[in-house]
Image (cartoon, grey):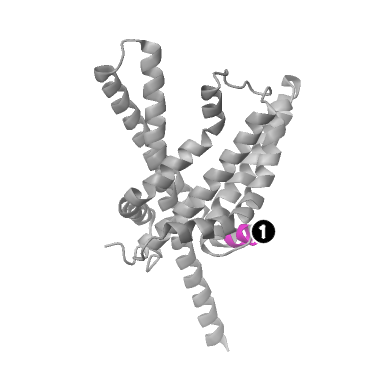
Amino acid sequence: MSDGLYPPVRPQSVGEALDLAVRIFRVTVVKCLPYGLLTVVVEQLPNIFNLVTARAPAQLGQETPAWWLLEALGTLGALWLMTAMLLRQRSIAQGRAAATGAELVEALRRLPGSVLLFLPGAVLLAPLALVPDAYWLWGLVLAAVSLAYLSIALFAWPALVLAGQSAVGSIGYSLRLVSGNWWRVATVYTVALGIAAVFCSVVTVIVLLVTLVLGTPDLAVMTAVATVSSTALSGAAAVPFAGAVMLTVLGDLQVRREGTDLQRRLAGSSAE
C-alpha cells in the first residue's frame, strides 16, 4: 500500500528518510519509468542530432546555433517531464490515481517558474567556456557561485512544484525549511547520491557483461553499445529515484517546520 507515504506523519531520522525514499521509489518506479526514459532521451537531443546527421560531437566553445537550440529544447523538455513525474510520484505516494494528461498540463503551467528558478545559474555557468586559461582563478570563483546558486535552486524546485510557490518564493520557502537542518539534508542527499552511483555502476557492469556474451567482437562497437544502453537504463531509473528523495526531504522538512511553528504558537499562548 502506498497510502500515507507522503507526507510523513512525523519527522524522520536520516535512516528513516532514506528508507521512506526507497519505499516511495519502489511503489512509483514502474509508473514513472516512461518519464525517466523520455527525460534521458530528450536530454540527448544534440547528440542524437549529431548521430543522425553523421556529425562529430561539438567541441567546447564551438557549438553551432542548431546545437544550442536543441540543447535548450532538450533542457526544457527534460524539466517538463521531471515536473510531471514528481507530480505523479506525489499522487501515487498519497494513494491517488495517476493521470498523465493532468500531470503534463500541470507541469506545463509550472514550467515558466522552473525556468526562472534555474536560469540565473545557467547564465552564470555559460561564460565559463569563454574564460581564458590565464584567468582560471576567476573561472573557479564563477563556477563556485554558479554551483552554490544551483544547489539552492535544487532545494527550491520541489517547493515550487509541490507547494505552489513562485520562483522567488520557493527560494525563501526552501531556505526557511532547510534552516537548522542543513547537515541532515546534506547527509540524506549524499547517501542517496552514493546509492545512485552504486546502482549505475552495477547496471553498467551487467550491460557490459551481456554485451560481451551476445555482442560483436568489435571492441569499439561493443563499448559504444554498452555505454548507450547502461546510460539509458540507469538514467531512466535514477530520475524517479531522485524524485523520491526530493519528495521525502520536502515532506520531512515541512513536518518539522510545522511542528516547530506549532510549538512556538503554543509557547506564545502559554506566555499570554
Residue nearest the observer in this picture, 20 or 61: 61
Q: Which residue is mark 1?
A: 168
The reply to whether residue 188 is visible in this rendering is: yes
- Majority secondary structure of magenta residues: helix
User: Which residue occupies 51% across, 23% down?
Assistant: 51
| Rendering quarter of residue 268 | bottom right
How many marks overall? 1
Q: Amino acid at mark 1?
A: Val
Residue 172 magenta: yes
**What is the magenta range?**
168-174
Q: Quadrant of the N terminus?
A: bottom left
Is 265 placed left or right of 72 in the picture? left
Q: Position of residue 141 (x, y in %)?
A: 70, 34
User: Which residue occupies 37% across, 69% down?
Assistant: 9
Q: Position of residue 125 (x, y in %)?
A: 67, 36
Q: Quadrant of the C terminus?
A: bottom right
Is 28 placed left or right of 83 in the picture? left
Label 1's element? helix
| Rendering quarter of residue 75 | top right
User: Which residue occupies 27% across, 22% down?
Assistant: 209
Residue furthest to the bottom in view is 272
The reply to whether residue 179 is visible in this rendering is: no
Residue nearest the observer in this picture, 261 or 91: 91
Q: Position of residue 222 (x, y in %)?
A: 36, 17
Q: Residues within 10 Å of mark 1 (few under 14, many from 20)?
A: some
Residue nearest the observer in this picture, 108 or 234: 108
48 shown above or below 194? above
User: Which residue occupies 34% across, 67% down?
Assistant: 4
Is 100 placed left or right of 208 in the picture? right
Residue 141 magenta: no
| Rendering quarter of residue 46 | top right
Q: Position of residue 115 (x, y in %)?
A: 63, 49
